[in-house]
Image: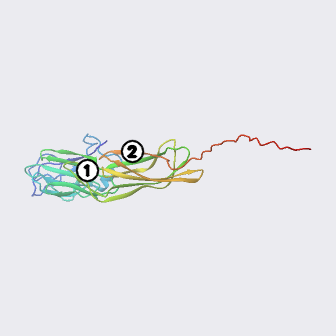
Amino acid sequence: MKKIIIVLLAVSATLALSCKKEEIGNTGAPGTIPIVFGIDGNSIGGTKAFSESTLPLVQANGFNVAGVTSENVTMFNALASWLPEKSYYKTDETYCYPASGGMNFYAVYPKSQPITVSGGAVTLVYANNPDTDLIASSATNVTASERSVALAFDHILGQVSFSVKGTDSNVEYKLRSIIVSAPGTGTYAYSSTSWTKGESIARTTYFSGEASVSTKAAQAIGGAQTYLPVEVQVNVEWDCYSKGVLVASYNKSTGVTLTKGKKTAVNLNLPNSDAKVMNFTVSVKEWETTTPQEITL
């Protein structure tokens, strides 16, 4: 899976004092050079950062980033916005490295997702929205001597897509719905890069309508969506017809395990165990012999 790369450009500075006008470099007295964020990939010669579809969104909307010192002091938790005239990202307020010790940086996109920093623990508390894809990154123990720190953004949800195929050529299949039940909330811990699911359940309609389903090849249904990367329940409803006459209806569920940062393609094979095929057994009785009739002419 491709990773999304943002590069943090930073130089030595102090916590409390103001920085001088924005410069990029690794020289200057403590507290004089600001922390700014830039994308590496074209001009600096690193790995190309974003896909063509993602980069414009990040540039247009920015991303959230938290800076925490090695002493667990939160220096900032703010939005980093793109400055096209500077070709880098920057928070509205200027921040500088501490005179001693390192910094830990935690980032997430989209900007609607807040970062929670409490007692040194950094988490994302997420309300499940299948239309939202989260990418997150961290860089720890960063010192002012390092000019650039690469933040490799990973997808931290699981993506799922469905294809459907009928298994009985004697009937026509009509798919009616695919409903996905997933945890309604979850907490992502940067330290372990893992999720803890919440108690609530969110039901999402992946497909609703009436779609004819082939028995010869699997058909893609709907578009890929993102959910918390744990087991989700999938409920499928379909009907079977014979020459336009409904002969059986089904409503079945199954579990599907989603993995963080991975696409899970699910092939649903629809059975037909209830509809009874009309079969005819034919027999012909033998001719019976009757008692001869006595007739006198």
Label 2 sits on what residue type? Ala
Nearer to me, 26 or 131: 131
Considering the numbered disc 1 on the image, is that residue within a helix, a strand or a loop? Answer: strand
In the picture, residue 185 is in which quadrant? Answer: bottom left
* Residue 225, position as x, y percentages in the image: 37, 51
27 or 37: nearer the viewer:
37
| Residue 197 coordinates in the image, percent (x, y) | 27, 54
Q: In this view, does 106 lie to the left or right of 293?
A: left
Q: What element carries label 2?
A: strand
Hey, which residue is sitting farthest right in the picture? Answer: 297
| Residue 131 seen anywhere in this rendered image of the structure | no
Place of residue 154 in the rendered image (x, y in percent of width and height, measured from the top left): 27, 46
Taking the spot 14% from the left edge, 51% from the top edge, the residue there is 33
N-terminal of the pair, mark 1 or mark 2, is 1
In the rendering, at what x and y percent does residue 245 appear? 58, 54
Circle count: 2
Viewer-closest of 181 and 126 = 181
Real-space Cα separation, disc 1 to disc 2, in angstroms: 23 Å
Which amino acid does the dot numbered 1 rest on?
Ala
Q: What residue sits 32% from the left and 45% below the top?
A: 262
Q: Mark 1 points at which residue?
A: 136
In this orientation, which residue lies closer to the viewer: 38 or 237?
237
Q: Residues within 10 Å of mark 2 (few under 14, many from 20)?
A: some
Q: Is residue 77 left or right of residue 266?
A: left
| Quadrant (top left, top right, bottom left, bottom right) of the N terminus | top left
Position of 102 compared to 156: left or right?
left
Residue beneath disc 2: 265
Confirm whether residue 168 shows in the render.
yes
Coloring basis for residues: rainbow
Q: Which mark is residue 196?
A: none
* Mark 1: few/some/many CA within 10 Å (<14, 14-19, 20+): many
* Quadrant where the image shows the C terminus: top right
